[in-house]
Amino acid sequence: MASFANALQSQVGRKILTGLTGIFLTLFLVAHLSGNLSLLIPDGGEAFNRYADFLHDLGPLLWIAEIILVALFLIHAYIGISIYRNKKKARPVDYKYYKSQGGPSKQNFASKSMLISGSVILLFVILHVMHFKYHLFSPETYMTSYNGEEMVDLARHVEVAFLNPWIVAAYSFVMILIGVHLKHGVWSAFISLGAKNPKITPVLYVVGGVVAVLLAAGFLLLPLYIYINGGLS
Amino acid sequence: MSNKDIISVNLKVWRQDGPNDKGRFEDYSLKEVNTHMSFLEMLDVLNENLMKEQKQPVEFDHDCREGICGSCNLVINGIPHGPEARTAACQLHMRHFNDGDTITIEPWRATAFPVIKDLVVDRNAFDRIMAAGGYVTVATGNAPDANAIPISKIDADSAMDYAVCIGCGACVAACPNSSASLFTGAKVAQLSKLPQGAPERKQRVKAMVEQMDKEGFGDCSNFAECEAVCPVGISITSIATMRTEYVKAMFS
């Protein structure tokens, strides 16, 4: 086991962990988005509220899922920061002039800003959980009932939040950043996990871009729709 | 690209007296540069001029000047080996510059490649990575029969694609993180394709990755800038291969 622990500390091990955690976080985003999109069903938010209530009622299972998610975020962020620290140590005197050769290079705005986009996303996730789970920015709790079953009206909570132009602007900005992060991240994860067929890697780069755009657009849809529409219905 | 036979260029060259000295840029002007000269021949002319003026010539590494030894290591206008893709600095010709251009020349910059003097860096870190595992078991005695070990054409070609590495270090120099993953990956991938590399296959990848970590190179972020500057065009599929080899070695 000692050698396995060492392997996780090695450059290759760290990269594989970054890729694995990144892929699981991306899958979490897909699940999260499909939950969100249930708000667009014109049923006054019932499907969304029932889904939230179902998750809430999972109890210990939900805690385990939450602990795993937090661990994924922390491992991913910790390795990301350590990569940055190593980079500073590995080249203390920087070039006066530095240019990309272009061609097969994947150096671009997305790949060069992974630490910045990642840090903003991490900060956002903390605020986002405070906002919707712990009601930090909107203390009132809305209740509703379906067939006599009392539950939290989370849909109303979301609606109120996204009628605030500042919240919509901040969310939109971060959702675009998530897209930017995924543009390099998804492709990079595949390479980190050993994708090496030269016929497939260019396809994976395109796939990464498509996943990034779809997820960012999906998450942007709800706040923009609620704000422009003046509410859910 | 210049159509003229003779151009003049301005040079901004990194000068550093020794490993522990602080470096600086010095400006030089060369009036009559023949565009058919290679970049290193242009530096030879500069050094001739400096010596005539009783000044210290600019130290730079070179050996074969045919693009196969991997000695030349100049970051030219911000790109290792200069602006031409798949071209070592020694094979870069002055016709790729224009009359009156200012050309900046810097050494490879990485903690693992300390500057010895001016543009010369110490690349022994690469040799230590090779010594850690970049070798194969060979039976001594008579030379073996040709084709005694059958290797498929596909594997042989694939191994050759990685074996063309000349160990120049441009991958490290170009990497925003100063990672040596392309170099190490190329060696691991090459030997993993061949039966001759099979006996040490598992210990090789572990030992070479461990040595790469020890030398103070940075992490790979899959920027693929290394592939873009590599004078022999080694693909980052070598890095992906190093990772799968590493996982296989850990779990078997």
Image: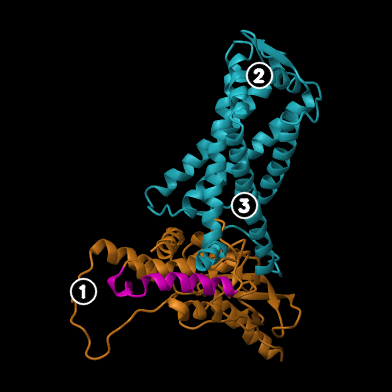
Mark number for residue B149? 1
Q: Which residue is mark 2?
A: A225
The quarter holding residue B240 reads bottom left
Q: CA distance from mark 2 to mark 3?
A: 34 Å
**x, y percent for residue A12:** 52, 62
According to the image, what is the colour scheme of the structure? by chain
Q: Quadrant of the N terminus of chain B?
A: bottom right
Q: Are marks 2 and 3 on the same chain?
A: yes
**Label 3 CA crowd tier, 10 Å (few <14, some 14–19, many 20+):** some
Which chain comes out orange in the rendered image? B
Check residue A81 for magenta coloring.
no
The kind of residue tagged 1 is Ile
Label 2 residue SS: helix
Tell me what residue is drawn at x 60 percent, y 34 percent: A62
Give the letter of the chain under mark 2.
Answer: A
Label 3 residue SS: helix
Range covered by the magenta-colored residues:
B194-215
**x, y percent for residue A36:** 60, 25
